[in-house]
Amino acid sequence: MSILTIKNLSKSYKKQKILDDISLTIDSPGIWALVGPNGVGKTTFLNVLTNILPADSGSVELVGKPNRDFRIFREVSYLQDNTVLFEYLTGYDHLKYVCDVNKINKARIKEVADYVGMTNYLKKVVGNYSLGMKQHLLLAMAIINKPKLLFLDEPLNGLDPSSAILMRKILIELAENGTTIILSSHNLSEIDRVTKQILFLKDKKIIQINTANYETVYYYLALSHSEKGKLILSENGFLVNEESGKLKIQLKDRSLSNVISILQNHQINIYDIEKEITGSEKLYEELFEL
Ligand SMILES: Nc1ncnc2c1ncn2[C@@H]1O[C@H](COP(=O)(O)OP(=O)(O)OP(=O)(O)O)[C@@H](O)[C@H]1O
C-alpha cells in the first residue's frame, strides 16, 4: 500500500496558481523534506494534502484512503503553526481532546508529554507558554496517535538548540519505527542532518531529489596554532578557511587522518574536531539560481 499518492493535483487562490498538476507517490517510511522559497506554496501544499483546503482538481490518498475521509487522522497527523492552539486551555486539555476525537487511551498523554519534555508545564494554560513550549505541545499532539504519516510545517520555529536536537532525535526515531514524515523547513543544515530525500517546490511543481550526489564533507578543527595550521594545510593542497576561530577544511579525495598527521608533524595540537555534511544547500542554490 502506498502511504501517500498524489494524482494531478492543482490549487489556485483566485487567479494565482500555486500548485500545477502535481503527481507524486511515496510508499516507504522515512523523512522527506519539503523545501522552497518563502511564498512558493509549501503550507498550501500541506493544507491541500490534508484536505484543510480543498484542491481545485486531482486526488490525494493518505495511508490508502482518500484524504476526504476524516478517519485518516487516526493514522495521519499534521503539525501546523501554533494558531491552532487555544490560549485558555492547558496542554493536557489539548492532548485529551486529541485522544477523545481519535479514541486513544488517555495513558498516552503522560507518555507523550514525557517523551517531548513538556511534563513540567502540561497543566499550565497555553496562554502562558513560550513559542518553544507551544512547539513541544504541537509535536505531542501530532505524535500521540503514533501516526503512519506525519506532516510538519516548520516544526523548528522558536526552538532553542537543545529542543531542536530533541526534535531531530524524535523525528529520526519515528522514521526508524515506520512513520513516513513530510517536513517543511527552511533550515537546510538541519534537513541535511535528518534526510537526503528532498521535495523541492518550484514553479508550482514538486521536484524529488536525493541529495547524496551533492554532498560535501567539511571538518571544523580547533587548533593550538590556527594561523600556522591554516598555512601548512594550504601548502599541502587542502581547501582551508577560518570560521569562528576554527579551521574549516573541505576533504575531497583525501582523508582526515592525512590532515591529523600533517598537523602533528608540525607540533600543532588538535583540541576539537566537528564534522558537517552539506548537500541540500548546494542543490538549493542551483535550483533557485542564487
Ligand atoms: N488564503 C489565501 N488566500 C490568498 N492567497 C494566499 C492564501 N494563503 C496563501 N496565499 C498566497 O499563496 C502563496 C503561497 O503561500 P504559502 O503560505 O503556501 O507559501 P509558503 O511556501 O508556505 O511560504 P513560507 O515559506 O513563507 O511559509 C503566497 O503568495 C501567499 O500570499
Image (cartoon, rainbow, N blue to C red):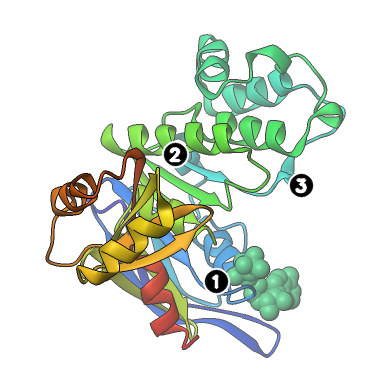
Give amino acid for label 1. Answer: Ala
Number of other residues with Cα within 10 Å of mark 3, as a class: few under 14, some 14 to 19, many 20 or more: few
Residues at marks 2 and 3, CA–CA distance in whole angstroms: 23 Å
Residues at marks 2 and 1, CA–CA distance in whole angstroms: 31 Å
Q: Earlier in the sequence, mark 2 or mark 3?
A: 3
Give amino acid for label 2. Answer: Arg
Q: Nearer the viewer, residue 229 or 202?
A: 229
Kindly identify which numbered label has been placed on residue 55: 1
The residue at the point 33 percent across, 65 percent down is 231
Number of other residues with Cα within 10 Å of mark 1, as a class: few under 14, some 14 to 19, many 20 or more: some
- Whether residue 273 is visible here, answered yes or no, is yes
The x and y percentages for residue 188 are 46, 60
Asked whether, in this view, residue 196 is left or right of residue 166, the answer is left
Q: Earlier in the sequence, mark 2 or mark 1?
A: 1
The x and y percentages for residue 226 are 42, 53
Q: Which residue is mark 2?
A: 168
Q: In the rendered view, would you say 71 is above or below 107?
A: below
The x and y percentages for residue 153 are 57, 53
Tell us which disc is closer to us: 2 or 1: 2
Q: Nearer the viewer, residue 88 or 170?
A: 170
Tell us which disc is closer to us: 1 or 3: 3
Q: Quadrant of residue 23?
A: bottom left
Element type where label 2 sits in the image = helix
Kindly identify which numbered label has been placed on residue 83: 3
The residue at the point 69 percent across, 36 percent down is 132
Q: Nearer the viewer, residue 245 or 166?
A: 245
Residues at marks 1 and 3, CA–CA distance in whole angstroms: 22 Å
